[in-house]
Amino acid sequence: MDALFCTHCGARQYGTEAADENPPADIQPDWEEKGHLFNLPSLFITVRDVLFTPVLTFRYLNRTPHLFNALLFAVLCGSVGFLLNSLWQSLMDFRQYLPQGYEIPVFLSSAGVKLAMIFIVPLGIAVGLFIGAGLCHLFLLLTGGAKQPFAVTFKVTAYAYGSTSLLGFIPVLGTVAGAVWAVIIQIAGLKEAHRTSYIRVILAVCLPAIGCCCCAAAGVVLLLTGLSFSGLSGLF
């Protein structure tokens, strides 16, 4: 199947013997061709394909520069996943339903915050996707693994995130399992979509996360150092 693509640029090759024996599949994922707000069958088909057959799904990824369908998929699924996760957290926090009067303001405040998040979450998902996909594509360029334009990296990231976000319906472990599964799908999808090696993709996916962790650790160290110096100056 890989013989259908150029090993240097990742472009699909037509008119070859391999292409005649293995004709290209339809546009993938299904949502790329049929995606809109009310096409639930296409959404569920895409979630199934991304979760369980990411290699085949992203091998024939639509490489057009149009990002709207992928962005809409990620925002829809991500928002639903957030709401499901919030619902489980509310149900498990049984103390808010106790009859004590002091619990009512806390409950109303929590509900108000969650209502506001309904409008904030879609925007946050969109911004986060562009930042995450941008960093990933930058590191793909640095490692020599970017055989396709940014749109391909964005689509893989969006479909991986959106599909795994729906695992939020599983209480407690759903969010953690979804995060791990999203990374696995992203690595497999980027490798197929860019026609590159796993090592380049793993570096591109993991290095930004490692960099963020290092920055956070450095910030904590600086904060603790500042507090220490502040305490010492107070003693003198």
Image (cartoon, rainbow, N blue to C red):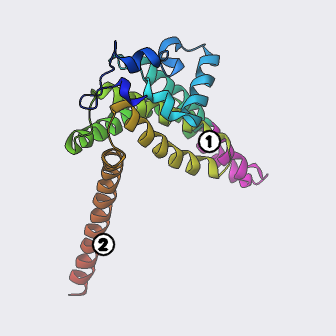
**Which label was assigned to residue 224?**
2
What residue appears at the point 71 percent right and 51 percent down from the top-left corner? Answer: 92
Decide: is 215 above or below 58: below
* Dot 2 and dot 1 residues touching (CB under 8 Å): no
Q: Assess whether residue 73 is covered by the magenta stretch.
A: no
Q: Position of residue 23 (x, y in %)?
A: 46, 15
Decide: is 21 above or below 174: above
What residue appears at the point 56 percent right and 33 percent down from the top-left corner? Answer: 53
- Residue range of the region highlighted in magenta in the rendering: 84-111
Residue 24 in view of the camera: no
Q: Assess whether residue 92 is covered by the magenta stretch.
A: yes
What residue appears at the point 38 percent right and 36 percent down from the top-left corner? Answer: 190
- 166 or 16, which lies in front? 16
Local SS, label 1: helix
Report the side of 24 relative to 115 (left or right): left
- 105 or 156, which lies in front? 156
